[in-house]
Image (cartoon, rainbow, N blue to C red):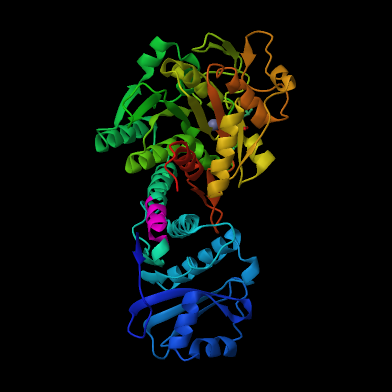
Amino acid sequence: MEYLIEKINLSKKYKSDCIVIGIFEKYQLSYIADILNKISDNYILKILKNNNFKGKINQIIMLYEVPNILIKKILIIGCGMKEKFNREKNKIIIKKVINQIKAINIKDVFWCLTDLIIKNINIYWNIRDTIKIIEENIYTFDKFKKIKKYTLSIIKFNINNNNIQKSQKAIIHAKAINIGMIKTKNLANLPPNICNPEYLSLKTYKLSKKYKKNISVKIIDETEMKNLGMNAYLAVGNGSKNKSIMSVIKYDNLFDHSQPIILIGKGLTFDSGGISLKPSLNMDEMKYDMCGAACIYGVINFISKLKLPLKIIGIIAACENMPDSNSFRPGDIIKTMSGKTVEVINTDAEGRLVLCDVLTYINQFNPSIVIDIATLTGACVVALGNNISGFMSNNLDLSKNIIKASLDVDDRVWELPINDKNYYNELKSDIADIRNTGNSNAGGAITAACFLSKFTKKYKWAHIDIAGTAWNYNENNKAFASGRPVNMLCQFLLNYSNYNN
Ligand code: BES
Ligand code: MG
Ligand code: ZN
């Protein structure tokens, strides 16, 4: 998909296949709509009035063969009351327009909605939002389909001279983030018989080959894990014939001694629950238990594309949780890499076991910030639903920056508390240092984070539980990866590197 900036003077001579314009209620025309209407000798307004088009939000109409105009199709979208037009409404109309464009197979569009004035939003964010919504609505996962769907190919933005630089920057950022999102979705949508831990490690290896100057990858296999004492991680993968593999992706574009930011992704390529087997209803969705890892892969793609001035270590913590005679069991006591022992109560609470060893492993890098991304708990879905990710942190500054990034790009998170001793009491074990599930089911997203927090004492840390947001459902109730929270993390890193407008 290409995004171009077009500086044109609309006149009778301007030729194109399709133009998109917005009209507010009470026939308040946007700048471009007004010009077009004048060229057409008021024909456009007349037609709208005859067709009862009042400019109500999402009212949509396509005009063909408008007098004096060589543009073949004029797609007009109602924007509601001018005074009430805001970021939310802008997103609503973009979605409507893009679905219309898809329905009639238009490939090349002159897009004039970015000149609608939106309260508190400048052109940079207007374009960022626009590209995000367009891309979200044209994405298809058809790798395994014989017949591929069509794709829209060119969007030309109408931008006035003052805004060109900001717009170009927005396009560059939005496209790089979109590449990250698509990489994440494509990886996450793969079936678990293809996307196993080895497959994930190969993907990271290929990425390092593509960006040789900035990326190196270290593969930690089971032998290495044993040497390191990562017994909790190993225990989870024991029941699978697919070996556990952790990929450590080092991205550096600073080449100095600064401390790295570490991003960790839970990469369960399938979570059957293990011996504590999950019910079969919707178990297929547990191929998405590697969405945290897929997210890290997408984010590293994004940083590399933009060559951000950062030092990042991305960790793909991959393994598969299967029932087998080699599986770990409820009742097992495992010595983690940190030395703490864990009593396994439920083998389905495996994500925290994998992560706790990774959180210990990374101490050697002396990180400035650590963020883990994980489809960690069903309880998080119960608490926050499917549009807001849970997050918990041991550092106020980090929390603020995560919230800021999430609001910037509307990739929402909500902070849950971990600073209450009652949660930690839930994790007390009579036989080991700690149990892997809370004593009750209450506050499950939080007790999981509290478990992790016992391994993150040495650095600023945030945990993002994406169990409810990493995938969503289409009109047939089929689950597809959402690519979240790639947008939020990319924005966090853009803000961090001061790379923004
Ligand atoms: N991967 C699941 C969490 C999950 C569940 C993600 C549903 C998305 C949708 C995780 O490994 C898990 O099974 N957690 C258990 C923990 C429980 C046993 C304490 C859960 O949430 O049921
Ligand atoms: Mg599980
Ligand atoms: Zn899991």
Answer above or below: position of 359 versus 53. above
Foreground pick, 217 / 237: 217
Q: Residue at x 52, y 63 (%)?
A: 95
Instruction: Tell me if residue 319 is in the magenta stretch.
Output: no
Instruction: Tell me if residue 170 is in the magenta stretch.
Output: yes
Left or right of residue 418: residue 486? left
Left or right of residue 470: residue 13? left
Foreground pick, 70 / 359: 70
- Please state the horizontal and vertical placement of residue 36, each as a whole percent of the image: 45, 82
Total numbered labels placed on residues in the image: 0
**Does residue 478 appear in the picture of this structure?**
yes
- Please state the horizontal and vertical placement of residue 490, each as a whole percent of the image: 45, 41
Left or right of residue 207: residue 10? right
- Please state the horizontal and vertical placement of residue 194, each as a whole percent of the image: 37, 39
Q: Residue at x 48, y 14 (%)?
A: 231
Q: Which residues are magenta?
A: 163-172
Q: Quadrant of residue 466?
A: top right
Q: Residue at x 54, y 21 (%)?
A: 353
Left or right of residue 285: residue 298? left
The quarter of the image that holds ligand 3 is: top right
Answer above or below: position of 439 versus 145. above
Q: Residue furthest front?
A: 162
- Please state the horizontal and vertical placement of residue 38, each as a whole percent of the image: 47, 87
Q: Residue at x 61, y 31 (%)?
A: 392
**Does residue 466 appear in the picture of this structure?**
no
Q: Which secondary structure is most common in the magenta stretch?
A: helix
**Quadrant placement of the N terminus:** bottom left
Answer above or below: position of 80 versus 443. below
Foreground pick, 179 / 204: 179
